Amino acid sequence: MELLKQRIIRDGIAIGKDTIKVDGFLNHQIDVALLEEIGKEFAERFKGCEINKILTVESSGIAVAVTSAKYFGYPPVVFAKKTAPNTMVEGCYEEEARSFTKGTVSVIRVSEKYIHPGDKVLILDDFLAHGEASLAMTKLIRKAGAEVAGIGIVIEKGFQIGSSKLRSKGFKVESLAIIEKIEDGKIIFADDENADADRDSE
């Protein structure tokens, strides 16, 4: 998605070789107009999938999922909770999700009331790195007897293993911007690498 890539180039900050800071427009301060375009792009990429529910994980995935929902005809958006509130007194599905960025393991939970057998659930999230959060969400969906319709990611770190891990399990993964590497403070996208290779072969 060219609009997203240009925004990452303009406002994203590379930290070291594996961290991209996008809190100016995606996960701290939110550019709602950009999120609208992201929602449209997800709807285009998952056109034809019979989606009746969207699942994300708190908290930075919520804005992406909610904004995208209207382009899928307003299915309910469910978000997995990282803590068990006192109000969650009914049964729930639970899975562990490791965060390599934070060095922690969280248990994410979804109430049994909100995902049902036969649901076709689209997972949406802001980042894909090692794929642990997305993988945990696929397990929650399957525990409920529902179907994973696909996984939509705003920014994928292509130099980490998340995408290949999810695709090897048969999931349809659509990432709007794939970062191939960070080199000398410069963010390089996967298709930019391919373009360089094409030019070299001419």
Image: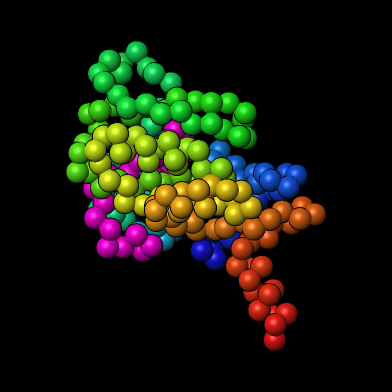
- In magenta stretch: residue 168: no
**Res 57 → quadrant:** top left
Q: Residue shown at 34%/59% (left/top)?
A: 46
x and y percentages locating residue 18 in the rendered image: 68, 46
Q: Is residue 196 left or right of residue 74?
A: right
For the magenta stretch, what is the residue range? 44-65
Task: In the rendered view, tell whether residue 113 sits above or below residue 183.
Answer: above
Q: Position of residue 139 (x, y in %)?
A: 37, 37
* Residue 36 vertical placement versus 88 (above, below): below
Rendering colour mode: rainbow
Name the residue: 22% across, 43% down: 119
Q: Which residue corresponds to the image point at 53% horizontal and 31% vertical from the top-left?
A: 98
Q: Quadrant of residue 95?
A: top left
Which part of the image, by quadrant, shows the C terminus?
bottom right
Residue 9 higher or lower than 116, as above or below: below
The furthest residue to the front: 168
Residue 20 is situated, as x and y percent measured from the top left of the image, at 65, 46
Question: Which residue is painted at 62% across and 30% down in the image?
Answer: 102
